[in-house]
Image: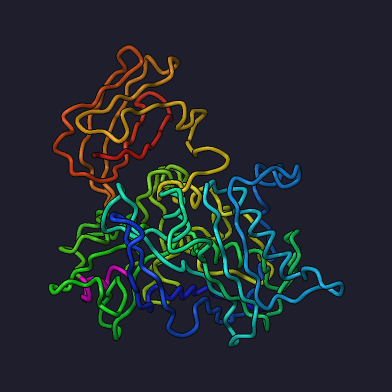
């Protein structure tokens, strides 16, 4: 029996970043790869025949040939054709995975993928990563967003017309199952691996690499963004949501330089603590109110540690796609709501509508103005008029900036005295004290 460990070595950890300016406010970092980009899969002896199908929403839209909510164009390199010169089974399976992501994510800007199918070393299934990162005006000057998400948020192409957003490679020497029905038998399901790797290319990845096994520098080794004091200037949007435990076990942002200085033994301890969590509000809500655990094994595993959900926690669940292990025969054709909740919190819009834990959606609760300066008003449906709410504002590093308990007055909740907040992106949490209503909104302070 064989088991494959998806150690997704997205070489943003090993990349040199070259930066340019698309306008006065947007900084673009182009990635230049050093060596094989990728996902290596050491072999073990386990087979797990199981199938997680696409969600009913996706299946219905694909069956009815509904227009996708985003357009993903793929440049196929080395994918074999069929006997008539048309797309072969590998390309058709890859396109099926693309169709799923197109049906899940909403973007006004075309996402371009450069995909290569070619021989690679044994144990290397494939890889994917953003071709570049960019800052997004109004959402934090030090946070870098993956190419496709940055273009979605800004609403236009960056880094040149029709520039590639995601680069990926897949090993043609692998005994793949190219079907789309999830019946992989004892083979490796190609659709699952493509879905997984494209998830990394769309933003589920952080900046970090091991430095001589002594500590961690969460940025590129070229030092372009590392200040003289050793601190890092930039972080990825994934980094912004990751917490480690302090000496009392309380969650604290991995970006907190006091607790987790760059290139330190403390950073090494954090990354091998088995105690990293993601404080994404929507992902937490989809995980029953508990911050989802991320993969931080006691022995650092390059490309696998940090940028995945925890294997022991989520293996065998509906949220297993973005864990670091895929068994032979295991077919996972749905990202799961924890992953989709995180993707929505980091900036993606979902084709199915915003996630929530109840019958209300984010669209039912209006927050204005947004962006705001001094105050915000929350307008709620009339059916909630007798409820009492806990309101909190959380910054992008997970720190609670404000908390208050309030009643609805004339269908509204007013929050004032916000003039002293720094210009940045925040999360507004709205939680009922008398029902299971829990909603999170992104708000921007001007």
The image quarter containing residue 228 is: bottom left
* Rendered view: 68 above or below 23: above
Query: Does the magenta segment cover residue 217?
Result: no
- Whether residue 78 is visible, yes or no, is yes
Q: Is residue 115 left or right of residue 229?
A: right
Q: Which quadrant: the C terminus? A: top left
The image's colouring method is rainbow
Give left or right: position of 79 versus 389.
Answer: right
Tell me which secondary structure the magenta stretch mostly adopts. helix
In the displayed structure, 154 sits above or below 169; it is: above
Which residue appears at 25% of the width and 39% of the height?
445
Q: Position of residue 280 (x, y in %)?
A: 38, 49
Write down the region rendered in magenta: 262-271
Residue 184: image location, x then y, percent: 73, 67
The answer to whether any part of residue 276 appears in the image is no
Residue that extends furthest to the right in the rendered view of this protein: 84
Q: Is residue 124 above or below residue 313?
A: below
* The N terminus, quarter of image: bottom right
Residue 287 on image: x %, y %: 46, 47
In front of the other: 378 or 122: 378
Location of residue 133 in the rendering, given as x and y in whole percent from the top left corner? 39, 64
- At horizontal 52% and vertical 28% (from top left) the residue drawn is 359
Residue at image position (82%, 73%) is: 85
In the image, residue 264 lies in the stretch drawn in magenta: yes
* Relative to 327, residue 373 above or below: above
Which of 415 and 159 lies nearest the eye of the viewer? 159
């Amino acid at each position: 029996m064989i088991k494959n460990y998806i150690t997704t070595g997205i070489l943003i950890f090993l990349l040199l970043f070259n930066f340019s300016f698309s306008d006065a406010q947007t900084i673009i970092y182009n990635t230049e790869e050093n060596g094989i980009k990728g996902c290596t899969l050491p072999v073990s002896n386990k087979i797990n025949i199981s199938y997680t199908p696409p969600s009913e929403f996706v299946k219905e839209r694909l069956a009815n040939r509904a227009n996708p909510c985003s357009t993903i164009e793929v440049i196929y390199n080395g994918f074999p054709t069929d006997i008539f010169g048309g797309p072969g089974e590998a390309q058709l399976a890859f396109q099926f995975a693309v169709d799923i992501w197109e049906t899940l994510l909403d973007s006004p800007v075309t996402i371009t993928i450069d995909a290569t199918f070619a021989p690679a070393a044994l144990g290397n299934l494939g890889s994917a990563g953003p071709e570049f990162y960019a800052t997004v005006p109004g959402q934090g000057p030090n946070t870098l967003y993956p190419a496709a998400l940055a273009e979605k948020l800004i609403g236009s192409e960056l880094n040149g017309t029709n520039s590639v957003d995601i680069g990926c490679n897949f090993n043609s020497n692998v005994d793949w199952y190219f079907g789309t029905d999830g019946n992989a038998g004892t083979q490796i399901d190609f659709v699952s691996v493509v879905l997984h790797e494209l998830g990394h290319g769309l933003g589920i990845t952080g900046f970090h690499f091991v430095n001589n096994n002594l500590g961690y520098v969460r940025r590129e080794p070229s030092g372009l963004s590392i200040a003289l004091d050793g601190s890092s200037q930039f972080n990825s949007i994934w980094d912004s949501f990751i917490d480690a435990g302090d000496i009392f076990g309380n969650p604290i942002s991995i970006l907190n330089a006091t607790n987790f200085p760059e290139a330190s033994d403390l950073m090494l301890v954090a990354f091998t603590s088995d105690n990293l969590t993601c404080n994404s509000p929507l992902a937490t809500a989809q995980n029953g109110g508990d911050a989802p655990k991320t993969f931080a094994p006691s022995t650092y595993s390059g490309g696998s540690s940090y940028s995945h959900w925890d294997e022991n926690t989520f293996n065998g669940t509906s949220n297993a796609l973005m864990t670091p292990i895929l068994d032979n025969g295991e077919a996972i054709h749905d990202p799961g709501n924890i992953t989709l909740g995180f993707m929505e919190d980091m900036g993606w819009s979902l084709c199915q509508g915003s996630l929530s834990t109840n019958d209300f959606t984010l669209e039912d609760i209006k927050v204005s103005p947004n962006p705001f300066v001094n105050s915000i008003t929350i307008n709620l449906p009339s059916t909630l008029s007798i409820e009492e709410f806990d309101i909190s504002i959380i910054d992008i590093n997970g720190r609670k900036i404000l908390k208050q308990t309030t009643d609805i007055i004339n269908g509204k909740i007013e929050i004032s005295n916000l003039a002293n907040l720094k210009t940045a992106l925040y999360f507004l949490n709205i939680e009922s004290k008398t029902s299971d209503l829990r909603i999170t909104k992104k708000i921007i302070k001007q």
